[in-house]
């Protein structure tokens, strides 16, 4: 069995797919299988995937009807045989040829390893996002690590900057919820509530491409707003129904507060009064403000009110795009 199963969902990314696959196949560490899931692409992505499958013996290709990111990831997981799972979005890439080899020293006895990643812009400039975890956290208990990683903004929702033990993943039924957007929020909380051993590396691993044309992440639909609201409510239930320490509960709610802050930016775009009411009911999460950004938004909310704060946030987000 290979050490890594690298799972790459594919949907209409013909302009970026080769660059993604080449970054994986050029790794100096080659004890991995690459599982490509063509999720009903209507462009040439499927043809590109077949071309690579015919060229490399360590590639598995799954062709399926379009079911969304979670469905594609789950299909790949079910075919995986590696000891550890890695998820790579098909418009992103690994930072260099040593990305995989840099992970190997951190694998022993860990369920999850957090990996450094950077934002990649179209002018090829980059911005580090997760690469400065405090080394002193390594000697802490798992709960102390989780608290420290969340409160220092090191733990983020993305599945793509995590290496996960496959047995742990399967035993804890960490499959992604299908049919929803913002699936990584709910998944992250389930992971944080079940992980027994967690570690991190500050070495760069992953380039997250910013705002490509047609990317799901650049558009926010009513379904996106609804699913994100529903996911946060689910997560609150998970946390409240779990036997965890006060410190860990507080950290997880701080983590959710950041996700809620993102949701709040789209409050004024919600097209129903009921949905707006559901979003606004969650505004107490802003009191969990270990994040500097959440603290600023919480202060603004107290000064000018919820509605005006939400309008200002929406304008900021839309102008930034």
Image (tube, helix red, strand yellow):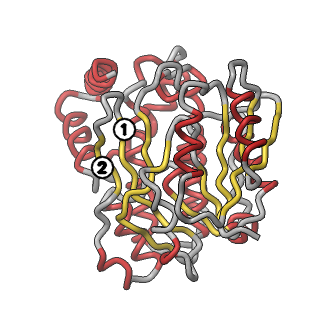
Could you tell me residue 78's position as x and y percent?
A: 80, 54
Say which quarter of the image contains residue 44. Answer: top right
Is 207 situated left or right of 320 in this image? right
Mark 2 to mark 1 CA distance (whole Å): 9 Å
The residue that appears at 73% across and 44% down in the rendered structure is 55
Residue 128 numbered mark, or none: 2
Give above or below for 261 relative to 276: below
Give above or below for 180 relative to 109: above
The residue that appears at 50% across and 22% down in the rendered structure is 220
Could you tell me residue 53's position as x and y percent?
A: 76, 43
Callout 1: 10 Å neighbours few (<14), some, many (20+)? many
Frontmost residue, 321 versus 10: 10
Callout 2: 10 Å neighbours few (<14), some, many (20+)? some
Give above or below for 321 relative to 64: above
SS for callout 1: strand
Is 159 situated left or right of 58 in this image? left
Work out whether mark 2 precedes mark 1 in sequence or the reverse, and give the earlier one.
1
Frontmost residue, 250 versus 121: 121
The residue that appears at 32% across and 61% down in the rendered structure is 151
SS for callout 2: strand
Say which quarter of the image contains residue 163. Answer: bottom right
The residue that appears at 66% across and 29% down in the rendered structure is 11
Is 292 situated left or right of 63 in this image? left
Q: Where is mark 1, residue-wise? A: 120
Is 81 situated left or right of 308 in this image? right
């Amino acid at each position: 069995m290979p050490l890594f199963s690298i799972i790459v969902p594919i949907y209409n990314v013909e302009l970026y797919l080769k660059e993604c696959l080449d970054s994986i196949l050029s790794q100096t560490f080659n004890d991995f299988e690459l599982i490509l899931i063509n999720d009903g692409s209507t462009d040439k992505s499927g043809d590109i995937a077949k071309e690579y499958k015919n060229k490399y013996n360590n590639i598995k290709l799954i062709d399926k009807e379009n079911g969304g990111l979670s469905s594609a990831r789950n299909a790949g997981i079910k075919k995986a045989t590696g000891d550890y799972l890695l998820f790579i979005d098909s418009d992103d890439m690994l930072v260099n040829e040593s990305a995989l080899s840099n992970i190997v020293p951190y694998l022993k006895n860990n369920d999850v390893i957090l990996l450094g990643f950077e934002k990649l812009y179209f002018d090829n400039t980059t911005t580090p996002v997760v690469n400065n975890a405090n080394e002193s956290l390594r000697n802490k208990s798992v709960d102390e690590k989780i608290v420290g990683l969340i409160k220092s903004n090191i733990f983020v929702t993305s599945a793509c900057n995590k290496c996960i033990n496959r047995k742990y993943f399967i035993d804890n039924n960490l499959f992604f919820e299908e049919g929803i957007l913002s699936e990584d929020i709910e998944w992250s909380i389930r992971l944080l509530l079940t992980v027994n051993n967690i570690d991190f590396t500050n070495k760069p691993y992953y380039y997250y491409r910013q705002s490509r044309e047609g990317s799901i992440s650049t558009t926010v639909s009513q379904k996106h707003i609804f699913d994100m609201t529903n996911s946060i409510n689910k997560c609150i239930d998970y946390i409240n129904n779990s036997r965890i320490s006060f410190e860990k509960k507080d950290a997880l709610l701080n983590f959710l507060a950041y996700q809620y802050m993102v949701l709040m930016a789209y409050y004024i775009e919600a097209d129903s009064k009921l949905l707006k009411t559901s979003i606004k009911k969650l505004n107490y999460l802003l009191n969990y403000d270990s994040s500097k950004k959440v603290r600023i938004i919480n202060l603004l909310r107290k000064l000018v009110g919820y509605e005006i704060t939400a309008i200002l946030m929406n304008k900021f987000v839309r102008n930034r795009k």
